[in-house]
Image: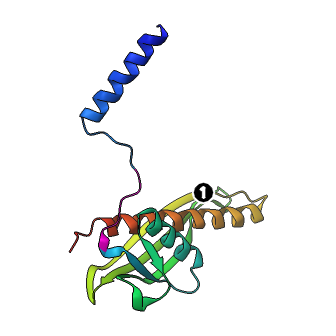
Amino acid sequence: MTRSAQRIAIIVLAGTLAACGFRLQGAPHLPELFARTHLVVPVDQPLLKRELAEAIEVGGRRAVDDPAGATAQVVVLESRSEQRVLSVSAQGRPREYEVVYRVRFEVLAGGKRVLAPQTLELRRDYPFDEADVLARQREAGVLLASMQRDMARLIQRRMAAVAPR
């Protein structure tokens, strides 16, 4: 295929995709209601708070520290993670673990609840190597950090779905 034929094919393909409404998934834009959002997150969850603040910024709004100047408030009512054994070897030793991360939250604006309390849950599993227990602990930590990042994006998507008032 010649270079000009490749260019024409790319232009036709791009035009076809644009015409059908296809677009790459990006961060959702948050409604004006969340212009200045205050985050109430348990003290023991600084990474979740940082990830939520970043998700709000990516959504085109600002996370603020002062609740008095906030237009909305995201309140994390509960945040917990647990780990359980998924499978065991013939000798009864763990072979695979599952990490479950749950967050219960609500969103308030103008003294009203705009998102009722709801629980989101993420699950991830990972193999266990008896020879390297420290690596398992590190992997669980990295996995939990990744889950907190994903959870912040899920909460952001729920916020983006709130109809503007």
Residue 92 seen by the camera? no
- Residue 122 colored in magenta in the image: no
Could you tell me residue 33's position as x and y percent? 30, 75
Point 77% across, 65% down: residue: 134
Could you tell me residue 100's position as x and y percent? 50, 68
Point 48% across, 71% down: residue: 52
Q: Which residues are magenta?
A: 26-32
Could you tell me residue 14's position as x and y percent? 35, 29
Point 39% across, 67% down: residue: 156
- Magenta span main SS: loop
Closer-to-camera residue (91/71): 71
Residue 127 seen by the camera? yes
User: On the picture, is 94 further left or further right than 2?
Assistant: right
Question: Which quadrant of the rendered structure holds the C terminus?
Answer: bottom left
Asked if residue 73 is positioned above or below residue 95 in the image, the reply reads below
Closer-to-camera residue (131/3): 3
Asked if residue 78 is positioned above or below residue 143 in the image, the reply reads below
Outermost top residue? 2
Closer-to-camera residue (146/26): 26
Asked if residue 81 is positioned above or below residue 67 in the image, the reply reads above
For residue 138, which quarter of the picture?
Answer: bottom right
User: On the picture, is 106 further left or further right than 81?
Assistant: left
User: On the picture, is 149 further left or further right than 137?
Assistant: left
Q: Amino acid at mark 1?
A: Tyr
For residue 62, which quarter of the picture?
Answer: bottom left
Asked if residue 110 is positioned above or below residue 11 in the image, the reply reads below
Residue tagged 1 = 126
- Residue 29 colored in magenta in the image: yes
For residue 108, which quarter of the picture?
Answer: bottom left
Could you tell me residue 130's position as x and y percent? 74, 60
Q: Secondary structure at mark 1?
A: strand
Numbered disc total: 1
